[in-house]
Amino acid sequence: MDKSRRSFLYRAGLSAAAVLSAPSAFRVREALARSDDPIILGDGRHRYEWIRGWAKLPEGVRFGNTHGAVVIDSQGRVLMNTDSENAVMIFEPSGKFIKGWGRDWKGGSHGMALVREGRNEFVFITHHSRNEFAKFTLDGEVVWIRGYPKDCPAYQKPSDFRPTGIAVAPNGDLYVTDGYGQSWVHHYTPKGDYVRSWGGKGTEPGKLSQPHGIWVDTREKTPRVLVADRGNSRLQWFSLSGEPVGLLDQGLRRPSNFHQIGTDIAIADLQGRVTIIDKDNKIVGHLGDNEDPDKRGKNPVPPEQWIEGQFISPHCVRWDSQGNLYVAEWLSTGRITKLKRL
């Protein structure tokens, strides 16, 4: 490793040695003989109970493929994407289905972010097949729609833009990842007006390969943009104006999305587990690690092959205000799991 590379990692507050020393105590604790015994994941301050059959769908309603995000509103309601005519499904914290909406946004609603404006909440959604991102009320009314970033020279036509993630900064600015398109990050004002772009496909720091999910990391005094650089099996941090400031490239498989609670960040790793990093970006544990490498990151795994307590393809994670963790997986028949904080 050359001197500049070591310096870059140091600025991120990381070291390979710290990552590789992550405690093994966070592995899945197998359920005991009886099927109703609690399934406990993790340890210490990240200890959870896997809630069996949390989501309760009414007769005739199916998830379909769950290839999207999950967010929690101020009432604790869980909103998640599906590829069905219910592009957004809404659940009570108990798992009771409330409603679904988004017929015109089926088959590609992929990233979501919530924002509160006064007494109202809105949800942003990226759609990789419509080549757009949009702002909605929580009842599904469209506020505005934005298309491909014409001001970025990497884009010549709408189909070049296949956005996968969206995040909101403390000042309301928006950051959108083009994970299935040209591997750029795009910065917009709160109204969806274009500001700048950075990235592009590559492996060197600052370049990206399938930048999938995105989050504005507020654990330091100055917020930073955190990108799931999934094709490069790493995380990258950028300043709010796009300068690369750090990365984590050890201990991850295929990071897809993340969420922050306090000084910790949970990472949905498509290859069969959820990973947690602390304030120093050190890995402190893995949850629900799938023991079968042939099932990790797979989409058409039928429910009869699922094992409670083990993830297959975590695609998005969200903590609620009580510290419970919700994990949406990329599965053809759909799955979302609640991990109750203990």
Image (tube, rainbow, N blue to C red):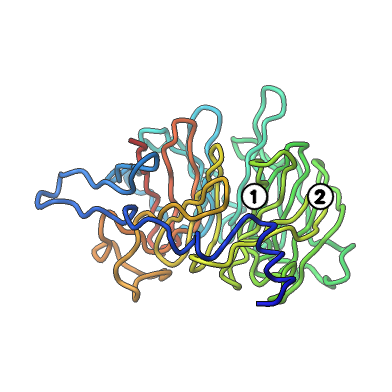
Q: Is residue 79 left or right of residue 172?
A: left
Q: Is residue 310 above or below residue 191?
A: below
Name the residue at 14% across, 49% down: 35
Q: Which residue is mark 2?
A: 188
- How busy is the neighbourhood of tag 1: few (under 14 within 10 Å), some, or many (20 plus)? many
Residue type, label 2: Tyr
Q: Which residue is mark 1?
A: 215
Residue situated in front as seen by the camera: 297 or 226: 226
Which residue in the rendered view is the most extreme toward the top? 119
Quadrant (top left, top right, bottom left, bottom right) of the C terminus: top left
Q: Position of residue 293 (x, y in %)?
A: 34, 74
- Judged from the image, the secondary structure of the residue bearing numbered disc 2 is strand
Circle nearer the viewer, 1 or 2: 1
| Residue 84 visible in image | no
Q: Position of residue 145 (x, y in %)?
A: 76, 49
Residue situated in front as seen by the camera: 118 or 99: 118
Q: CA distance from mark 1 to mark 2?
A: 14 Å
Name the residue at 51% across, 67% down: 254
Name the residue at 48% across, 68% down: 253
Name the residue at 53% across, 44% down: 264
Q: Position of residue 104 (x, y in %)?
A: 62, 53
Residue type, label 1: Trp
Mark 1 or 2, nearer chain start: 2
